[in-house]
Image: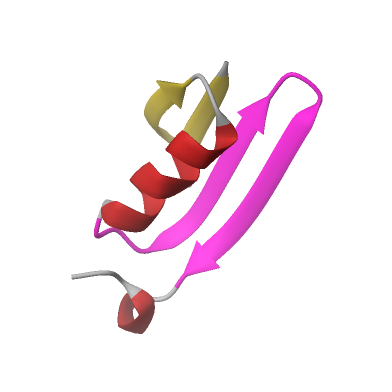
């Protein structure tokens, strides 16, 4: 199970990394995303100008 955060706010739990990253991309949100799971951690930043509209 993978938990996706925007900053410290939990956005959701996902059963795969690709599903979580797709959700983050399509969310229309910007900021620091953090994806955390068992033995897995990834972070990236989406700038306001990079948001998918």
Quarter of the image holding residue 28?
A: bottom left
40 with respect to 4 (left or right)? right
> Is residue 52 magenta-colored?
no
Q: Residue at x 64, y 52 (%)?
A: 43
Question: In this view of the protein, which residue sits in the foreground, 30 or 15?
Answer: 15
Q: Residue at x 57, y 24 (%)?
A: 2
Question: In this view of the protein, which residue sits in the foreground, 2 or 17?
Answer: 17
Would you place residue 26 above or below residue 34 in this image? Answer: below
The colouring scheme, among rainbow, by chain, secondary structure or one colour, is secondary structure
- Numbered range of the magenta stretch: 28-46
2 with respect to 27 (left or right)? right
User: Which image quarter is the N terminus in?
Assistant: top right
User: Which image quarter is the C terminus in?
Assistant: bottom left
Question: In this view of the protein, which residue sits in the foreground, 33 or 21?
Answer: 21
28 with respect to 7 (left or right)? left
Would you place residue 48 above or below residue 11 in this image? Answer: below
Q: Main secondary structure of the magenta part?
A: strand
Q: Residue at x 37, y 78 (%)?
A: 50
Q: Residue at x 74, y 18 (%)?
A: 38
Is residue 13 visible in the rendered image? The answer is yes
């Amino acid at each position: 199970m993978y938990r996706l955060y925007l900053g410290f706010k939990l956005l959701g739990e996902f059963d795969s990394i690709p599903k979580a990253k797709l959700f983050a991309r399509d969310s229309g949100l910007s900021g620091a995303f953090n994806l955390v799971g068992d033995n897995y951690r990834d972070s990236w930043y989406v700038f306001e100008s990079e948001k998918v509209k």
